[in-house]
Amino acid sequence: MPDPVWYKSLYWRIAFGFIAMLAALLFAQGLVVLWLTDRVVGWSAQSPQQLVTSVAADLSTALTRDPGLMLDSYVRDEFRHIYRPFAVVMTDGRATSNRPNGLPPTYVRAVQQRLRRGEPLTSVDPRDGGRGGGRGGGRGGGRGASPEIRSGDSPVRPSGNDPGGPPPPRGSAVAPIVVGDAQIGFVVIPINPPPVFVAIRELGPTLTWVGVVLLAIGAGSAALLIFSPAHRRLRTLEQAARALGEGRTDVRAVEAGGDEVSSLAHAFNRMADDLGARAAALAASDRARRQLLADVSHELMTPLAAVRGYTETLAMPELNLDAATRSRYLDIIGDETHKLEALIGDLLDLARLEGGGSTFTMEDVPVKELFSRVADRHGPALRERSITLDVSVTPPDLTVRADGQRLEQALQNLAANALRHTRGRVSLAAEATSEDTRMSVRDTGPGIPPEHLPHIFERFYKADAARSATKASGSGLGLSIVQAIVERHGGTVTVSNAPEGGAIFEIRIPRPDHPPSD
């Protein structure tokens, strides 16, 4: 599988998602700040004098309507939306504010002290606690003088008798609360904007809660859009891994997505495929082992039963067997013993070939000599059954890179198989191609039924019922040995039926300069 596409990578998605979430949070926080600022600025658009005049008129109306009005609750409920703090000071000593934390701590006390002394609210110093500071108050109203109090729209500043010079240009706006014809209190507000810490203290909780909510929403959205798909696929991969651990080799993970999780799922699926193939191979090997044990037991039991039966017969003292019968029984025992010996030898030989325990000596072997030894070996059987053997080698000096003894063994087995199933002609042919050397053994027998062809090289498999030209039968291991020998040479052996009848076994051994392709 190719590497993950960079823009689909989980790392890049996390980075882009974090940047997008941060930008969205900053944008939303900016909107909230603008909304709060709009509310503050909306009221700040009024001058301080206009604000206190409006508030004083509202309080005058409310107190005229209800003299027993709970002033503190009324001010906080009606004017809590005004972010600029102001103070309401009554002549009877009551005082309140819409935002008490937004005023200097001694501001209201200074106003109350002046009212108790009957001084006009022309200048208020929140730091003197009411110890002086009226007009012409000398040193008591000098350098420590605080904001002046405006009356109407005309600011009234402290006198210039203060040797330290005039106080800073700070002041307050004041408006009277009138019920009937009497002034029963005043609304006072500093002219200058509140300090920064006041704005932080007032707006901080709102901005904090809004930020927390936005952060939670942003984190939830990022988790839903970025991590949730990967989490689902990881859970699927986890479930597939658990199922694979439980022995289910058919489970596969989802490879969609194009990111690191997809690469991991692809690697997992490849591992599952390999494990499935190995499990299938092990199961097939186990079945083959069981079948081999059953076949070997069956093949061994037949001659062993014959040997035992005839031996027990010869050992019976009550039977008076003549010499001819006794000799015939002994011959049968000998034949069955030879069959057992040949069968066990074939089994050992096949086990060594398939297990790699046999060492091959590779050399250039003349093919004509191989065919000559095969003809010599089966000469008596050919003459006895009047079977013609044809040999063809092209070119005549053709050689093959092989183990001579093992390749001759394969050809001898094929020739013996052909002789068992024909009464006419057997042909041995060889030719060289640009890639391999091809050797074939052909007979003119009845051929092999198509349904038997895929199984003809299996251990103990016999198709004698179909090729019944003779009742002779081998152990069922000869063709398996042929296949093992040819495969150890890196070649292949195939079987087919000729159009005019008979079976054709073909061996292909690759030339040294053309090794077999995978």
Image (cartoon, helix red, strand yellow):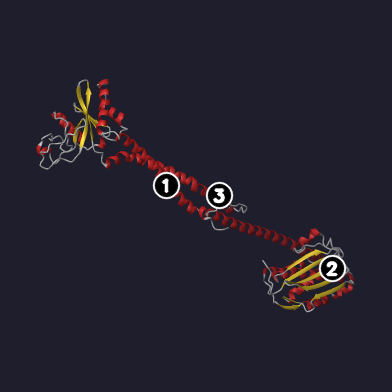
Q: Is residue 363 left or right of residue 138?
A: right
Q: Name the residue at the front extreme.
A: 154
The residue singled out by tag 2 in the image is: 443
Label 3 SS: helix
Q: Which residue is mark 1?
A: 23
Q: Residues within 10 Å of mark 2 (few under 14, many from 20)?
A: many
* Side of 508 where 74 appears, left or right: left
Q: Is residue 166 visible?
A: yes
The location of residue 47, given as percent across then percent down, is: 26, 34
**Amino acid under disc 2:** Asp
* Mark closer to the chain start, 1 or 3: 1
In the picture, the quarter occupied by the C terminus is bottom right
Q: Position of residue 12 (x, y in %)?
A: 48, 53
Find residue 100 and name its label.
none
Q: Where on the picture, by quarter, is residue 502?
A: bottom right
Of mark 2 and mark 1, the one earlier in the sequence is 1
Q: Secondary structure at mark 2?
A: strand
Q: Amino acid at mark 1?
A: Ala
Q: Which residue is mark 3?
A: 236
Nearest the camera: 426 or 232? Answer: 232
Mark 1 nearby-residue class (10 Å; few <14, some 14–19, many ≥20) = few
Tell me which residue sits at (12%, 39%) in the image. Answer: 142
What's the residue type where badge 3 is placed?
Answer: Thr
